[in-house]
Amino acid sequence: MIELQNVTYRYEDGASPALEDVALSIERGEFLAVVGHNGSGKSTLAKHLNALLLPSGGKVLVDGMDTADPKLTLAIRQKVGMVFQNPDNQLVTTVVEEDVAFGPENLGVPPQEIRQRVDAALASVGMTKYATGAPHMLSGGQKQRIAIAGMLAMEPEVLVLDEATAMLDPRGRREIIETVSRLHREKGITVVMITQYMEEALAASRIAVMSEGKLLMAGPPQKDELRRHRLDVPAMKELADALRENGVDLGEDILTVEDMAQAVCRSLSKS
């Protein structure tokens, strides 16, 4: 779906590259997490996926389209939707459903189809009952779900979340990850999630690790590899794995304290 061919990017001439010779393929229907410490280049990489930034060297192809071709920019951005850190910067109207309709309206989608897209997008993120409400009255997690709905209404094939949970509390982060995981599972949307939270990254099927502008690895989540690159594995994941090694299997999807508490309660109720 997206291919980065030896991509290098500098924010100014003479500066150290923010990306250096990055080669990465993102498959159609994949859930990829991109992780790394601050300044590793992960957000710079994200902005290359829909031509917000263009490579200083190398090439980015989106479904075969070269992002450097200005005639293809609109088509690329229709295929790849982006959700950023601060949902307040992405909400442009005073009514939720009007905000979700904003993108399709600018694409010239007929009004009847816009109505259908808005209803479907709000239903997909569980925000239908807030359709006529004011965005500024919503929680951070709810605002971010509206921002995601606005992208979904444009019917992209790829959803890129650039640190989209960074400004949210733990509950808000969990809401967004659950929503995105469900959209990926049920609708087959390709998801690229840029994150600094390892409990979020472990929800992906593949993890790409960035450091100082370079791609260090890309593959299935592996604790030893993550530790080698000084990235922390969530404590509850460690505890669940240790319990499993000692004969107590509480399940594979334990990442948070709440997950662990629920798993323990289920195990106790069975015994």
Image (tube, rainbow, N blue to C red):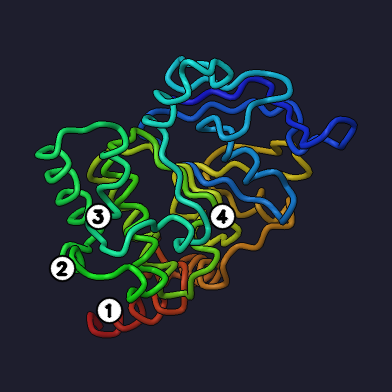
Q: Residue flagged by tag 1: what amino acid is it? A: Arg
Q: Residue flagged by tag 3: what amino acid is it? A: Glu
At x 32%, y 49%, the residue is: 150
Q: Position of residue 187 (x, y in %)?
A: 24, 41
> Residue reaching furthest left?
112
Which quarter of the rendering shows the C terminus?
bottom left
SS of the residue at dot 4?
loop
- Which disc number belongs to residue 266? 1
Mark 2 and mark 3 lie on one chain; the one further toward the N terminus is: 3
* Local crowd size for mark 2, using a 10 Å CA cut-off: few (<14), some (14–19), many (≥20): few
Q: Residue flagged by tag 4: what amino acid is it? A: Thr
List the residue tagged with mark 2.
Answer: 129
Between label 4 and label 1, give the one nearer the viewer: 4
* Local crowd size for mark 3, using a 10 Å CA cut-off: few (<14), some (14–19), many (≥20): many
158 left or right of 112 in image = right
At x 38%, y 28%, the residue is: 28
List the residue tagged with mark 3.
Answer: 98
Mark 1 and mark 2 lie on one chain; the one further toward the N terminus is: 2
SS of the residue at dot 1?
helix
Q: Quadrant of residue 152?
A: top left
Query: Disc 2, disc 3: CB below 8 Å?
Result: no
Q: CA distance from mark 3 to mark 1?
A: 43 Å
Q: Position of residue 250 (x, y in %)?
A: 37, 70
Q: Position of residue 261 (x, y in %)?
A: 39, 82
Q: CA distance from mark 2 to mark 3?
A: 14 Å
Mark 3 and mark 1 lie on one chain; the one further toward the N terminus is: 3
Mark 4 and mark 3 lie on one chain; the one further toward the N terminus is: 3
Q: Quadrant of residue 117?
A: top left
SS of the residue at dot 3?
helix
SS of the residue at dot 2?
helix
- Which disc number belongs to residue 195? 4
